[in-house]
Image (spheres, rainbow, N blue to C red):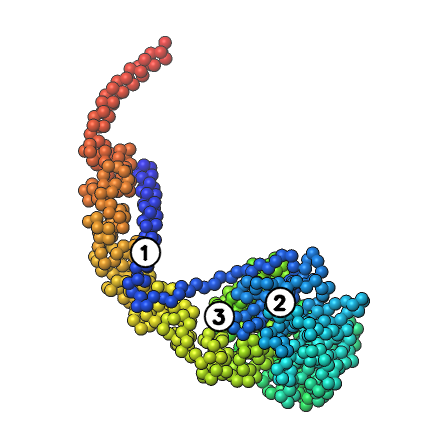
Amino acid sequence: MIKSVSARKKSMLFFALFVLFVSTTLNQTQVDSSLVNEEDYFSESLKKIYTEDQSRQIFLPTDYDYSYAPLILDFNDDKVLETVVVGTMKESVGKAIFLIRNEKIVSGWPLELYWNAANFEILGEVSLPGDPDEGIAFRYTELVGENPQETFFIVTENGDIYLPFGFTLPGYFVAGTIFHDMDNNGDKEIILVRRDGYVFYLTSEGNNITNWPMQVNDSVNFNQPVVEDINYDDELDIIVCTDTGMIYAWNQNGSLVENFPRNLALTYPEEEDDEWIREMPIVDDFDNDGKMELFAASTISYIYGISLDPHTNKTWVAPILISLYDTVQGIAYDLDNDGKKEVIQYTSNGLSVFKVREELEEVFSFYGGGNFYGTPAVGDIDGDDYPEIVITNSIYVYILEHTGTIKKRIDSWLPYSNDISPLIYDIDDDKEVEIVHLSQRGIIFIEETNDYGLMPWVDIFGSSTHTTNFDQDADGLWDHEEEILGTDMYNNDSDGDTVSDGDEINQYLLDPLVSDTDRDTDGDKISNIEEIDYYHSNVENPDTDFDGIGDWEEINIYGTNLLSSDTDEDGLSDDYEILYDFLDPTNPDDAFQDYDEDNLGNLDEKNWGCDPGNPDTDGDTLLDGDEIKRYYTNPLMSDAEADHDGDGLTNVEEVDIHESDPSNPDSDGDGYGDGEEVENGSDPNDENSIPTDKSSLYWLGLIIVFPLLGILYRKQKRQTIL
């Protein structure tokens, strides 16, 4: 019995090794079959091979620290986005400005500035007077003796510093400058707040607008200004929240908006150093009533709201997760697509989302541990028409569904985090958005989303105006996005092709400046609009499901599912079934049929690499199924006379004639090989049957041994008696 078990183990081991050999051969055969399939069955070869990008990193020079938020722009209006990054020199005093395009530093950059510059800030893109080129505006703080001042300058695309822009302002200023065309005259104006309460409104040349600056009767240490039309007079207003919760709002002519200043009515206003506002206010029409509201959180774990309508005194208050300081910033966004934005209040421990109704209604809270920073980045990154929320702390990057559940947690950014917010935009010009995060060590982490679009969140606050309310033509593109793209922010269909600018950019990958509704990006003979609206296929991949059959062929020739490589889910891929005319890629039953009657079903034929239309794939006279199930031979190799166990009998002889095991050289485990037993007349399947010549020697041995044992026994007995 022990010998029999050992023999079975040997048999199983041999069979496993044989299967491994056949599988290796099968894999090569399948690859070759795929190539033949492409050549024979494509009515048109695929235009290109599409591969989905993987998450990756860009490494910037290590002799700089990177602690300033990047700027996204289209420098030369070619619809290829550039990224501007500022580094601080480690071994010297100064800054370096990088221009990155298609994930590479543009030739001739970085521009090194050996200036004693602190609080560096990238303001935005600017047109140069009398020059067709564009530049990048910067602001920084420098000390002149013991006196601080703010300095402004422009850098052109070729790296030249544009000096006529240069001007200075004395004093310490709050970080976060408004750089926006306030009066629609084609030039951008500058709004910034000094910590002693002065609010400046300047032309791009640095000149004060008439009646400005203004001063508030309070300090403003952290709260950045906001621009919004709060009284609906078609003119943007300038809003500032002080440290103690006083709200100031001015018309552009310097007059206060009616019924301002207002007061947030903090819970502990009389307690010194007890309650302060340390975040930029969040301004929007949250309840869709045609009136603006303002919300801000305080240092004692409350969020306060106030209606900005001069004739309404409505206020709100609700508890939040934790006290709020200047390391985080809340935003506004319509997360559930109901046409009303929610207050997304960010804290160092996570975030709380509120609907603004008669009371603040908490939608959900997300607790993710500590050390969250910056602002959330928001955008639809998976094509489900609902936005996702991207937030970062010192350990993870969290991607949350619009309901607050975790969609993905990214661990790989752990050692490199700092307080720069993530952005969502197309960094590599593949017309798909990526989540992009710059670390202080100069590593740009890129999380691939494979979702169409260019830039749902390219500014750390949502826009250069610090509010997400600017989509004046309601086309799905914010005004600052239209500014980058060159589309008309007052016309929702800039090219007049009946498709809104937002849909062209973020859904169909069309050009909003050219009438191109019939565009076919991947050359598969299906227009982008048809692919997305009707077939939900990939407009950049002519073979969406990677099954070797073009999308057009699947729809118009084979009737298969262009989103699935196995339409009928029977284990046989569509291209395999199309290769054989007796198989049907829409009929799951044919996987278990045996068309060539070789005792092997069609699915098994595919798995073994056999030809389902040929009962003897290798032409060695053995049926494919018999080779696998009976003879243990390779159906892909002519080996009918093979002797895999090396016992002197072919596999066919063992199975058909002697009924022995072709994978075991000693089928009955009696110590004699199967071939030796057959040659000498014994049964290779009976352990009690051994070769005849061996049997004679066996009995002769017994005749000799037993008498000798008797003599030895008697001799031993006599010695014992004596």
Q: Which residue is mark 3?
A: 431
Query: Which residue appears at 26% of the width and 37% of the height?
Result: 647
Does residue 330 appear anywhere in the picture?
yes
Callout 3 amino acid: Lys
**Relative to the observer, which residue lies in front, 329 or 697?**
329
The 10 Å Cα crowd at callout 3, few under 14, some 14 to 19, many 20 or more, is many
Task: Give x and y (percent) for residue 332.
Answer: 60, 77
Residue 159's label in the rendered image is 2
- Mark 3 or 2: the one toward you: 2
Residue 32's label in the rendered image is 1
Does residue 328 appear anywhere in the picture?
no
Query: Which residue appears at 59% of the width and 83% of the height?
Result: 287
- Mark 2 or 1: the one toward you: 2
Q: Is residue 582 left or right of residue 301?
A: left
Callout 2 amino acid: Gly
Quadrant in the rendering for residue 419: bottom right
